[in-house]
Amino acid sequence: MTEELVRMEDIVKSFGKVQALKGVDMEVHNKEIVGLVGDNGAGKSTLIKILSGALSPTSGKIWFEEERVSFQGTNDGIKAGIETVYQDAALVGQLSVARNLFLGREPLKKNALLPSLDKQYMDEQAVKLLQQVGLTTIDPSAKVNNLSGGQRQSIAIARGMFFRAKLIILDEPTNNLGVEESRNVLSFVMETKERGHSSIFITHNIRHIYQVADRIVVLRDGKKVGDLTKEETTMEEIEEMITGIEVLNA
């Protein structure tokens, strides 16, 4: 097995009397795509928010690159090398592709009398990045509002690749996308692995998980009920773990 990148151990999260996570363990290794699946309310979003720093666990331990971490916010997660791509892609529609690639981390002109954005640098880097990741049909100066859903997801993932994120968390990246756009996003996810990044792929679509994931982690009612390579299981077995109900084959 490849070197361990993330280890989450006995993670518990309570919201008042509601226990969203009940002692969950999860690992992610370098250059590994982990599919994280479960029904609504299973605890998937809570778990990745804890990993990214958006939430603090009630109890439990997290290691990142073999160092014990306790993120106090998403900026801590980003600094450590964790990029999260949500299903709405978290992009600003009225801004250009280039501006969105640097959103929140805009470079400033050096040696300028007054701080100002280095738009030339952003445009140049956007052109290079889009070429590197095969998004050659996208104009870096185009407004994000003019892009398709699949293109927006790819731009958001590319942003994590540009900033050399060690772990890219993908929250329902193919949700509400058509067949062709979903295929393109899945190819892009595979490209992140080839370029040395690890990913956690969260989805309700088991078929998509089987196309890209090396390993599948299943949550149900705040507990981990499965952790298997896709060669060790079937889509029917994964569905049974998600629902707790045996799938009857016709």
Image: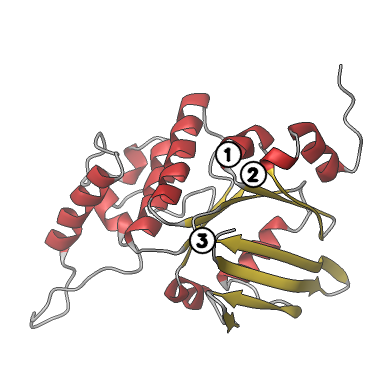
Compare residues 204 and 195 and report the one nearer the observer. Answer: 195
Mark number for residue 30?
Answer: 3
Q: Nearer the viewer, residue 95 or 203?
A: 203
Q: Secondary structure at mark 2?
A: loop
For the residues marked 1 and 2, what is the alpha-carbon distance in whole angstroms?
8 Å
Camera-near label (3 vs 2) is: 3
Give the residue at mark 1.
175
The local crowd at label 1, few if under 14, some if 14 to 19, many if 20 or more residues have their Cα within 10 Å, is some
Q: Where is residue 100 shown, x and y percent of the image?
A: 32, 55
Asked if the residue under mark 2 is in contact with the one under mark 1, i.e. CB atoms within 8 Å, the reply is yes
Q: Nearer the viewer, residue 100 or 228?
A: 228
Q: Which mark is residue 203?
A: 2
Q: Earlier in the sequence, mark 3 or mark 2?
A: 3
Left or right of 211 in this view: 230: right
Q: Upstream in the sequence, badge 1 or badge 3?
A: 3
Alpha-carbon distance for marks 1 and 3?
Answer: 26 Å
Disc 1 residue type?
Answer: Asn
